[in-house]
Amino acid sequence: MADLAHLAEYEMSLTQSWRWYGPNDIVTLNNIEQAGAFGIVNALHSIPVGEIWELNDIRDRKKLIEWDADNSKPRNLKWVVVESLNVHESIRQGRADKDEYIQKYIQSLKNLSECGIQIVCYNFMPLLDWTRTDLKFKVAEGSLALRFDWSALIAFDLYILERENAIVDYSESEVEGAKNYFVTLSESNIKELTDCILQGLPGTSEVFSIEKFKSLLKEYSGIDRNKLKQNLKYFLQNVIPEAEKLGIKLCCHPDDPPFPLFGIPRIVSSEEDLEYLVNCSVSPSNGITFCTGSLGPNPNNDLPGIIKRLGDNIHFVHLRNIQRQNGKSFYEANHLGGSIDMYEVMEALVKESKRRLSIDRDDYAIPYRPDHGHQMMDDLNKEIPFHGYSAIGRMKGLAELRGLELGIRRSLSR
């Protein structure tokens, strides 16, 4: 990282960051400065997936983030991570025009590198990004959280989407649970569930129609887990060597949730998957966005262990907790609550940072952000356009994580 002076104030080793959705975000850059974050995580959401991020557009966004035009002075903010430079479906599906989109992707990386941006997050989730069934789940203290209910997902698949042969993907008990759930839904409930599941990419207001989503699903007929993995490998083997020349670190975000949906395989859901990914093209530029909230719903994922074993390849971190419920269901808990031992995760991250520093790696200040946050307090009176990204809940999470890191750093120094 180029500017590490921000770490001194709190004796930190990791770069505290914040996802900002650009000029349309109701959370302003001044709000973020007040929250105490330094790194900005941002993307040019207005550019269609697959098209080139032009140099002038990147420069304009970087200036907007880092320069306070109203007061004619620099902000204490730096654009440290792009999230996300999305991968076009032609690449994921291995279509005939995939190389054209790979070249556009590389050109975007060249333009980002020229502007000094060195970390780029992406994902390989087919069609949908993160998937939830409830965007306003009320937790015990009255805050609102995001939730994924497995029975609701199956009910949508079987009785609303009516995907052909979907029933073979589920057990008898799962089908029974989905049927019991579905009969309780009103017409408005069905619309709400449909709109929730068929959200488009983050930063957009697009919601797929049932017809559109069915047609998109058909494009994946014949693409099994092995084929999707080969398509990921092809992408990485073509892009990573160019990224390494540019000094850019690419980091793949895990699947969210970490299991197949709608009959389509997901291939970045476990430690084994992450090992495959980093071995597709061995390079310091090929890495992982370590997301606790995406890996966490699967209790078999040993999160501190993954950091210890694959920490060399972690370039960016999302810290979010989840509370596992029955089967594959979960809701997003407080950052220090839930089913994930955030102390063990943070301790492993601090140790990885210290290890890098001990061997003179210049990327020891790994950027992390509080991923999502409960809608709470005054934010309950606001319409939040980007679900999970209200200000107060994330500020609470950042404060908790900052304190946790400081306590661990101090204890390790004794």
Image: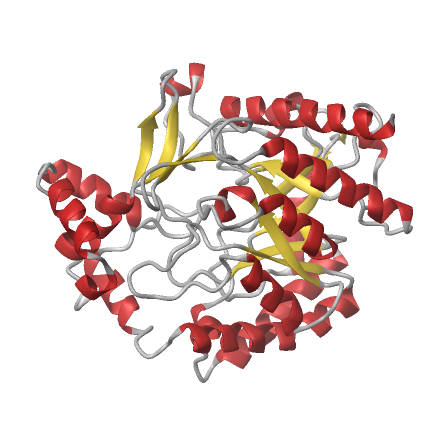
Residue sitting nearer the eye, 134 or 83:
134
Is 305 located above or below residue 374 in the figure? below
Q: Is residue 177 left or right of residue 397?
A: left
Q: Is residue 349 left or right of residue 373?
A: right
- The percent position of residue 137, horizontal first and vertical second, equals 32, 29
Q: Is residue 210 left or right of residue 237?
A: left
- The percent position of residue 327, horizontal first and vertical second, equals 32, 45
Q: Is residue 199 left or right of residue 191?
A: right
Is 252 located above or below residue 317 in the figure? below
Which quadrant of the structure image shows residue 264? bottom left
- Total of numbered circles in the picture? 0
Q: Quadrant of the C terminus?
A: top right
Residue sitting nearer the eye, 181 or 112:
181
- Asked whether the viewer can see residue 57, the reply is no
> Which color scheme is applied?
secondary structure
- The percent position of residue 49, horizontal first and vertical second, equals 47, 62
Point 48% across, 34% down: residue: 339
Which quadrant of the structure image shows residue 65? top right
Point 43% across, 63% down: residue: 266
Point 78% across, 62% down: residue: 247
Is 216 located above or below residue 230 in the figure? above
- The percent position of residue 85, horizontal first and vertical second, equals 56, 58
- Asked whether the viewer can see residue 263, the reply is yes
Point 86% across, 52% down: residue: 361
Residue sitting nearer the eye, 389 or 269:
269
